[in-house]
């Protein structure tokens, strides 16, 4: 029932072709797939599985239970940004079986030929996914990816120090927050924030506008205490910072520990994203990876993930199992109107480097 | 006798030109060196998860640590890599130190330059250069590549330490052995090796320490399933507060200290014994 | 048998002794370094990756004010860290070198022990101390010295402190070695000739221990520019040092050629320093920098 | 030993000076007066406290007890740089990073003399030690003896009234050492400076000193001019330490004189109780072949004959297998004695010196 | 020098042995025969090639040219462990990681003797050097002299026929050195081993050797028994190096004899051309006060009088301001000469030794 809340298929911005197929045409291949995974051909399972995932994104418990059930040992490494994941895959050598890139990064990886096509017959539990999360523009027909979690990028703040409630990215620039702001350590998100504040798109490729955003950020720098994509909640909870830019799930976690913490999407739209499970080219254990993905799609497993890291779950069956407290947390499952206007990141091609360069420049200014 | 002079006299007589100041300064340096360690140890026994108030004694973080497979596995990886790297680099470094002390050959200076690279260039350069190598020959990143990297930098340090020992080694001892009728083989095993051994051991110890502690080179050369303890710690530290890290530090400190005490004991026995 | 063969042929003996190291160093030390230089001359593909379009453009890019700024900032930070380590380390090493031998060894071991516990953990220890609600702020507030937490962590000062902390032993040990070698009777001679302590220090002790000062400075300066994780953790990822820059190019920006160029620049700076040192102080046979 | 001097004659005075390093008693109470312009040598075995005594005079060590006076002024608490005393250190302690000129100029520069005067005085000092052409050299480019002379120049250029020298010749080889002894002695006379000189080489002490202070185990055993120390040692230690000697047991004869090696030697023994046992020092070179005129003689059997160029040493067994060392110039009749042969020897009563232990 | 010995008398023979290290000519051609049971000393200044020569005999260095024979067998190409020669190294080279016992047993163990025999022989060797109670000590717990004796025991336990000793006493202090000299010499006689002994101490060489080989700059200057070396030096170098001497210029008188210090000395000069200038060595102790009977005498003015205990040294200026050193026993009439005084001295013609340069 809550699934509908999140609403809309990701929209492609910046001139990419519109979605070709209506969502939902895709039918789960196996109608009666068993929750127990009884059809899994255990003889084809490998001993190990290498998972490469964002930090703070996968409860240990979930992995342990998978290990117990299938006798497959899961190694996992973490990354803090999509760019880092891409770099690792491009470097080759590091043979991961499952990676969790976001929307635009999936598109890049596909275009770079870095991904394997998924054999969906091995992922019957995909039927639990809400239609609105499937068949995204960045991977029409979900040939290479299936959704893992979705969420937003907004403003986290501490009500004790931040009054009135912030409404705009611009609030981060207020002089009273000198040294009290945390930002994601992510070139696209941080540059995107400034672009939005200036009234541009997060996916701007025009050099002049990017320059402008850079200048804006340089003004912000005195307020910035730290760049942190991994665990910005730590800084918030320790009251090291009062306000900042974060992923919604991080904010939700902070709110569980301290009721003074709040999260809003700014009036400049904020960000919307969806992270996906993919199998990189040359993965040594593809079959096991698909079994693993299928396992993650079990409602009770997905619910466990969505409770531990309260981002939006694309698994509608799982959402039903969630605590009301989590389901009703507006940080995790924001009102549809707010969500609708939040802006997606898309691949900006050559401009990627400008984003990185300007971000470096911002950090090195002083 | 002016007052100034009298004061200066007193100072010279007792203070010995700021000896006292030096002592205080040294005390502060030790405080600086040990404060963070002390903090970690104290908080590893503190019940509270957050904050710095001492809320009571507990061993729960040690229990949690003992159950944390990720840490244990990383520790195991580190140990495996360190043992392999120590053995291999000690053998290579020692052999090379002997070669340098005993042989003349073309390209000696160049080779020596290469050996010094890891000591004089920032680690990050070695890290990325090995990454470039491994990725261009398509070698799968993992414990093997980490071990190769560690062997490469450790052998340089082993080389330096053993070379210093060999430099102090009195070659007349070898001559004496041969003079007494021992052939090269007997001379090496009965005289040279036992005498250079402490240097080799010191080199091995250094290699082990460097390997177990390495972050940067490992960062670039590691792959799936090959997370070492420092990298594991790196990712944990990034999430901030975790008393398990405190517990881990305390355990590591205890292990280090006992190793040092042990080494000291051995050394002492050696001294009263032989060397 | 082999032994006999080896005894007969000195050339074979040399080969057996030097071969393994030469091979290993060739493959894992020399080739990678050459590769880095090669890559630094190539170009970045649209989405990362390397395209074999040769040129010096990566070095040209490094000449942009931004990257020169990063280099400058790194050199500045390195210099600061080195100076602080020197000022802290010198009197310390002097004190230690003046103790009787048994005490001296104990004091030195005490310097090295922290060095043997994980560097990251120790850095983390400082984070616990310096946080807003950390040990230091709590103590200061409890003592009523301040009513609001001071901003200590995630500052430039914090990352310099972290670097000094990690690198101090590298300063102390060579300093100790050269101060210990310093013949204190020279100091006595200076006093004897009428010099007061300050003058004796500046004209005798300092010049005589200069090799230690320089060796220590290099051992601190060189790594300080590459230790990216200290400024990430203690400085809140705000300062970009050349180490961070290189790391970012390889792990985020996917511009290996540019990262390689930055690495080559860093390598050049480090080598220049070492060569300067060797020029100034030569190197006695069998003695190493350490 | 203890004769009191007029104050103005005393340059340096030590009163009850002691030095302890923790449990180690390095100097156990030294009283000493050094005369103006005197060449005084502290002589004694390694570890007897010579350097420590010198360092207290120079101001590098503070006495645990006692006072030190220079020209009558109590300097016990003054810093080294406040005393008009200079030191030539055992290892020279030349500044290796300064050229010879700058080494010698160091003390003058500290005193902020005009550069012109410095240049003159340095060159004068270097000329004095015959090193005028060496001003631009680095210390390591000098031989041991030259370094020693630079150290000397560096000290005397300041025209100190007292110069302390701690085994300045210890590192030199025999030949150079002999040359430098002569040089130093001449310089001291020429400049009229008070020298306090430390050595553990007896021959050196005998050769150079006006007076010798023999130290043993932190205490003064005997003070006196060289010939007195050599010929009239007060103690067994002094007799054995200065030159080679035969230490023999003797008994005071009832009729006076000593029973020694089986003969009665008419030595004055007023102060000794008849029948008491004493120890006597008899120098090897004082034992000579006996002839018909000798009032007493002892027969000894030669066991070894050692050729030492200018002289001959015989090892011989006397009565009761007592081992004796006898020496004489190479040309004397001793040279003919062969191992195994028995010869008769004698000595003057005056050469028997009764020592205490 | 060159008298040829019967083959069986020659233990070690060097024929035209040379050694070059790159451009350095360490040994420039040495011919030498060492007799069975002889105590032969290589004497010479630092760097003259003594150690190099020894190391070639021991087998650690290979001659650049020439051959080495032991007992008539050419051993030039044998490894050290294949020669029945043992060495006592300059710094002893005791194995620091083995106790005294194991040090001494090393060579026997290498030869795989039964442990029982080893024990016996080690104890016998230690007893010989008077260290029987020290078997369980570590080398660093021994004094220098004791270490030296262990090194000796380690070598002699193998009953070598030739023992090489490289400045074995170099590190000892004077007193111990003297004692050890006597000890070593006695041991050598007792065991009948051929000793080849290296030293740069002339007195030591004179005291101990059967024959002395004086080396200079990689070459042999003179070989002969001690008294010959001292009293009949062939060259200026030998005269100056062995003991103190006065090297004086002289002219061969037309009527025979030498013009020396203004007087004619009736020295046999058959082989010298009248009028030619030669150099003469005259030992200080051979110069003595002249009396009425002296056929010739020279007046000298005493400038310094140096007391050295057993003897007196005078520095004096002779005709033409020539500086002379004169010495004599302490009791002689020379002792009364005071600085400034003029005395007349003389010497025997036989004491004037003509030397080449
Ligand atoms: N700083 C010190 N601490 C402890 N003991 C000391 C110290 N300096 C000297 N001693 C001890 O004091 C005693 C006298 O030493 P000192 O150096 O005066 O002897 P010395 O007569 O100069 O001997 P040498 O001839 O060997 O130079 C020795 O036993 C020495 O070990
Ligand atoms: N390995 C070597 N390489 C080059 N030159 C050498 C070597 N060994 C010795 N020499 C040179 O050969 C010469 C003779 O050396 P040697 O050691 O035989 O002298 P020595 O007579 O034993 O001197 P000392 O009395 O100082 O021990 C010296 O000039 C020395 O510098
Ligand atoms: N700590 C896990 C955060 C995952 C966030 N993914 C968002 C990607 C947006 N570009
Ligand atoms: Mg002394
Ligand atoms: Mg030698």
Image (spheres, coloured by chain):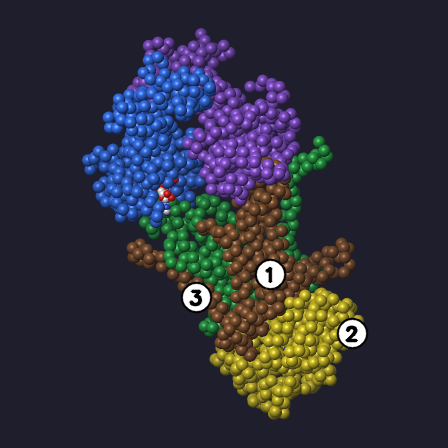
Chain colours: A yellow, B green, C brown, D purple, E blue
Q: Secondary structure at mark 3?
A: helix
> In the image, residue B174 lies at what x, y percent?
37, 47
> In the image, residue C183 lies at what x, y percent?
54, 42
- Name the subunit of mark 1: C
Q: Which residue is mark 1?
A: C75
Crowdedness near tag 3: few (<14), some (14–19) or many (≥20) residues, C-alpha within 10 Å: some
> In the image, residue B147 lies at what x, y percent?
48, 65
- What's the distance in space between the residues labelled 3 and 1, CA to CA? 31 Å
Counting residues from the start of the chain, the first of labels 3 and 1 encountered is: 3
**B148 and E58: which one is in front?**
E58
* C286 on left or right of E4: right
> Mark 1 vs ligand 3: CB under 8 Å?
no
> Mark 2 vs ligand 3: CB under 8 Å?
no
- What's the distance in space between the residues labelled 2 and 3, CA to CA? 60 Å
The verdict on a common chain for dots 2 and 1 is: no
Crowdedness near tag 1: few (<14), some (14–19) or many (≥20) residues, C-alpha within 10 Å: some
The structure residue drawn at horizontal position 39% and vertical position 18%, both measured from the top left corner, is: E299
2 vs 1, front mark: 1
Q: Secondary structure at mark 1?
A: helix
**C154 and B185: which one is in front?**
C154
Quarter of the image where one finds residue A318? bottom right
């Amino acid at each position: 029932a809550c699934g509908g809340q999140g609403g809309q298929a990701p929209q492609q911005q910046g001139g990419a072709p519109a979605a070709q197929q209506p969502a939902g045409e895709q039918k789960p291949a196996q109608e009666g797939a068993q929750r127990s995974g009884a059809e899994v051909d255990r003889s084809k399972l490998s001993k190990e599985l290498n998972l490469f995932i964002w930090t703070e994104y996968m409860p240990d418990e979930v992995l342990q239970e998978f290990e117990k059930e299938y006798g497959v040992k899961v190694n996992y490494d973490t990354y803090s940004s999509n760019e880092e994941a891409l770099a690792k895959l491009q470097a080759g050598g590091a043979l991961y079986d499952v990676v969790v890139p976001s929307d635009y990064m999936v598109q890049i990886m596909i275009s770079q030929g870095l991904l394997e096509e998924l054999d969906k017959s091995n992922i019957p539990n995909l039927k639990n996914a809400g239609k609105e999360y499937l068949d995204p523009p960045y991977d029409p027909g979900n040939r290479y990816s299936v959704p893992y979690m979705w969420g937003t990028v907004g403003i986290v703040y501490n009500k004790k120090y931040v009054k009135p409630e912030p409404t705009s990215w611009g609030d981060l620039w207020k002089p009273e927050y000198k040294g009290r702001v945390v930002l994601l350590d992510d070139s696209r998100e941080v540059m995107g924030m400034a672009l939005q504040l200036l009234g541009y798109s997060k996916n701007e490729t025009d050099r002049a506008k990017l320059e402008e955003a850079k200048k804006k950020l340089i003004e912000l720098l005195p307020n910035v205490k730290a760049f942190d994509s991994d665990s910005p909640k730590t800084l918030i909870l320790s009251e090291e910072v009062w306000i900042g830019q974060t992923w919604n799930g991080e904010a939700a976690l902070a709110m569980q520990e301290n009721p003074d913490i709040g999260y809003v999407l700014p009036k400049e739209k904020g960000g919307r994203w969806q992270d996906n499970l993919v199998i990189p080219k040359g993965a040594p254990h593809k079959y096991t990876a698909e079994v693993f993905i299928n396992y993650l799609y079990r409602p009770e497993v997905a619910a466990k993930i969505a409770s531990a890291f309260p981002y939006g779950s694309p698994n509608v069956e799982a959402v039903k199992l969630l605590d009301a407290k989590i389901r009703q947390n507006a940080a995790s499952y924001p009102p549809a109107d707010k969500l609708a206007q939040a802006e997606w990141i898309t691949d900006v091609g050559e401009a990627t480097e400008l984003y990185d360069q300007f971000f470096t420049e911002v950090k090195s200014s002083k | 006798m002016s007052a100034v002079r009298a004061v200066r006299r007193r100072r010279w007589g007792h203070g010995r030109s700021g000896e006292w100041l030096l002592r205080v300064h040294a005390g502060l340096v030790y405080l600086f060196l040990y404060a963070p360690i002390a903090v970690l140890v104290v908080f590893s026994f503190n019940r509270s998860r957050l904050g710095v108030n001492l809320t009571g004694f507990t061993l729960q973080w040690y229990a949690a640590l003992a159950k944390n497979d990720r840490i244990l596995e990383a520790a195991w990886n580190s140990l495996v890599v360190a043992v392999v790297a120590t053995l291999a680099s000690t053998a290579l470094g020692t052999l090379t130190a002997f070669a340098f002390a005993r042989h003349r050959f073309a390209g000696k200076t160049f080779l020596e330059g290469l050996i010094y690279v890891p000591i004089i260039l920032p680690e990050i350069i070695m890290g990325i250069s090995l990454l470039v190598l491994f990725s261009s020959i398509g070698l799968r990143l993992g414990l093997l590549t980490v071990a190769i990297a560690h062997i490469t930098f450790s052998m340089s340090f082993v080389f330096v330490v053993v070379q210093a020992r060999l430099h102090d080694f009195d070659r007349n001892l070898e001559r004496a052995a041969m003079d007494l009728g021992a052939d090269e083989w007997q001379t090496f095993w009965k005289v040279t090796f036992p005498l250079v051994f402490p240097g080799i051991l010191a080199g091995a110890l250094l290699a082990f320490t460097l390997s177990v502690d390495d972050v940067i080179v490992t960062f670039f050369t590691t792959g799936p399933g090959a997370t070492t303890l420092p990298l594991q710690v790196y990712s944990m530290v990034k999430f901030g507060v975790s008393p398990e890290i405190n517990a881990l530090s305390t355990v590591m400190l205890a292990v280090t200290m006992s190793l040092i005490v042990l080494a000291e004991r051995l050394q002492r026995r050696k001294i009263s014994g032989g060397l | 048998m082999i032994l006999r063969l080896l005894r007969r042929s000195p050339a074979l003996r040399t080969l057996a002794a030097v071969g393994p190291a030469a091979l290993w160093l060739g493959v894992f030390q020399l080739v990678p370094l050459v590769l880095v230089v090669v890559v630094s001359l190539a170009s970045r593909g649209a989405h990362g990756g390397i395209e074999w379009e040769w040129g010096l453009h990566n070095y040209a890019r490094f000449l942009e004010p931004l990257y020169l700024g990063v280099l400058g900032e790194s050199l500045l930070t390195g210099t600061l860290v080195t100076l602080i380590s020197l000022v802290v380390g010198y009197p310390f090493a002097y004190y230690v070198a003046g103790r009787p031998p048994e005490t001296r060894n104990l004091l030195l071991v005490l310097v090295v022990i922290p060095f043997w516990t994980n560097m990251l953990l120790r850095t983390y220890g400082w984070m616990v101390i310096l946080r807003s609600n950390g040990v230091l702020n709590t103590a200061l507030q409890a003592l009523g010295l301040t009513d609001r937490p001071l901003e200590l962590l995630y500052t430039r000062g914090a990352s310099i402190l972290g670097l000094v902390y990690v690198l101090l032993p590298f300063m102390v040990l060579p300093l100790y070695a050269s101060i210990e070698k310093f013949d204190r009777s020279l100091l006595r001679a200076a006093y004897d000739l009428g010099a007061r302590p300050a003058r004796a220090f500046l004209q005798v002790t300092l010049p005589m221990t200069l090799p230690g000062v320089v060796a220590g400075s290099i051992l601190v300066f060189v790594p300080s520019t590459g230790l990216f994780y200290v400024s990430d953790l203690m400085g809140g990822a705000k300062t970009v040092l050349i180490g961070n820059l290189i790391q970012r190019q390889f792990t985020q920006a996917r511009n290996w050629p540019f990262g390689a160029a930055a690495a080559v620049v860093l390598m050049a700076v480090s080598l220049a320093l070492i060569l300067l040192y060797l020029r100034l102080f030569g190197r006695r046979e069998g003695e190493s920098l350490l | 030993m203890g004769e009191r001097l007029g104050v103005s004659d005393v340059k340096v005075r030590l009163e009850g000076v002691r030095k302890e390093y923790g449990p180690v008693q390095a100097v156990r109470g030294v009283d000493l007066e050094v005369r103006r312009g005197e060449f005084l040598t502290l002589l004694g075995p390694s570890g007897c406290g010579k350097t420590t005594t010198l360092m207290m005079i120079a101001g590098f060590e503070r006495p645990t007890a006692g006072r030190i006076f220079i020209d009558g002024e109590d300097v016990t608490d003054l810093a080294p740089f406040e005393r008009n005393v200079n030191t030539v250190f055992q290892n020279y302690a030349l500044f290796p990073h300064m050229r010879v000129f700058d080494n010698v100029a160091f003390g003058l520069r500290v005193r902020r003399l005009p550069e012109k005067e410095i240049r003159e005085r340095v060159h004068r000092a270097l000329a004095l030690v015959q090193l005028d052409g060496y001003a631009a050299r680095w210390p390591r480019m000098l031989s041991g003896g030259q370094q020693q002379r630079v150290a000397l120049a560096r000290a005397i250029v300041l025209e100190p009234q007292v110069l302390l020298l701690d085994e300045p010749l210890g590192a030199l080889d025999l030949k150079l050492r002999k040359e430098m002894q002569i040089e130093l002695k001449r310089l001291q006379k020429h400049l009229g400076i008070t020298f306090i000189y430390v050595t553990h080489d007896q021959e050196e002490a005998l050769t150079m000193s006006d007076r010798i202070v023999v130290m043993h185990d932190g205490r003064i055993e005997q003070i006196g001019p060289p010939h007195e120390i050599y010929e009239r040692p007060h103690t067994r230690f002094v007799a054995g330490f200065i030159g080679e000697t035969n230490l023999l047991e003797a008994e005071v004869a009832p009729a006076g004189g000593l029973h020694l090696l089986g003969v009665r030697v008419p030595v004055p023994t007023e102060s000794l109780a008849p029948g008491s046992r004493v120890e006597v020092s008899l120098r090897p070179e004082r034992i000579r072949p006996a002839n018909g005129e000798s009032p007493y003689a002892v027969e000894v059997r030669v066991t070894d004959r050692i050729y030492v160029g200018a002289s001959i040493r015989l090892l011989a067994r006397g009565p009761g297998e007592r081992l004796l060392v006898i020496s004489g110039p190479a040309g004397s009749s001793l040279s003919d004695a062969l191992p195994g042969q028995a010869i008769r020897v004698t000595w003057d009563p005056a050469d028997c010196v009764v020592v205490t232990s």
